[in-house]
Amino acid sequence: MQWGLRKGESTRRRERELCQECEVYLSGHYAEYLDTRNRTVPNWAWLGVLAHGRPEQLRALVADKALFSGTRTRTTAWWQAIAFLAEEILSQHNDDRGLDDLRRSVLVPLELEWLAADRPMQRPGQLVRSVLDALDQYPSSRRR
């Protein structure tokens, strides 16, 4: 029994929380969800912003990077890395179809690779290098 809750109520609460986390993950907001709760954000969750976030979310990250009234809302190196990568991706795949193809072919497989590897926490630069290397392998993403 947990703080006077009946066993069934505690289980239902955990089930709702799990469903909520799954929804947040699949919407590309899992890193933000963890970050705002001061929880450790695994490497693969940062990649999930790019792999699952709506195009509008990626555009908002790029716009935020450009400074609004002289202040960024997300100042950590991780958010700066994600904003940089979002800008790189959108500069070459700004249409929804191209972005979806890129995600299926490059970003989701890379995210799953990172998830399966269960790597120790790395620095944002490693994420940037990994994503740029993967993008270079994708035919229509070759950087000029």
Image (tube, helix red, strand yellow):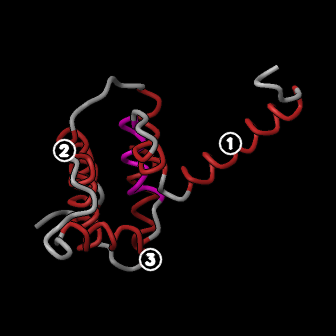
Q: Label 2 sits on what residue type? A: Arg
Quarter of the rendering occupied by the C terminus: bottom left
**Relative to the observer, which residue lies in front, 43 or 133?**
43
For residue 129, above or below residue 61: above
Marked residue nearer the N-terminal end (3 or 2): 3
At mark 2, the secondary structure is helix
Quarter of the rendering occupied by the N terminus: top right
At mark 1, the secondary structure is helix
Q: Which mark is residue 96?
A: 3
Please identify the residue farthest to the bottom as the structure is shown: 95
Tags 2 and 1 touching, CB below 8 Å = no
Instruction: Return the x and y of residue 38 as percentages of the image width and height.
Output: 40, 38
Give the residue at mark 1: 17
Q: Label 1 sits on what residue type? A: Glu
Where are the magenta residues, as a range?
A: 41-52
Separation of disc 3 and disc 2 at Cα?
24 Å
> Which residue shows up at 41% across the image and 75% down it?
56
Q: For residue 42: magenta?
A: yes
Marked residue nearer the N-terminal end (3 or 1): 1
Instruction: Return the x and y of residue 25 as percentages of the image width and height.
Output: 54, 50
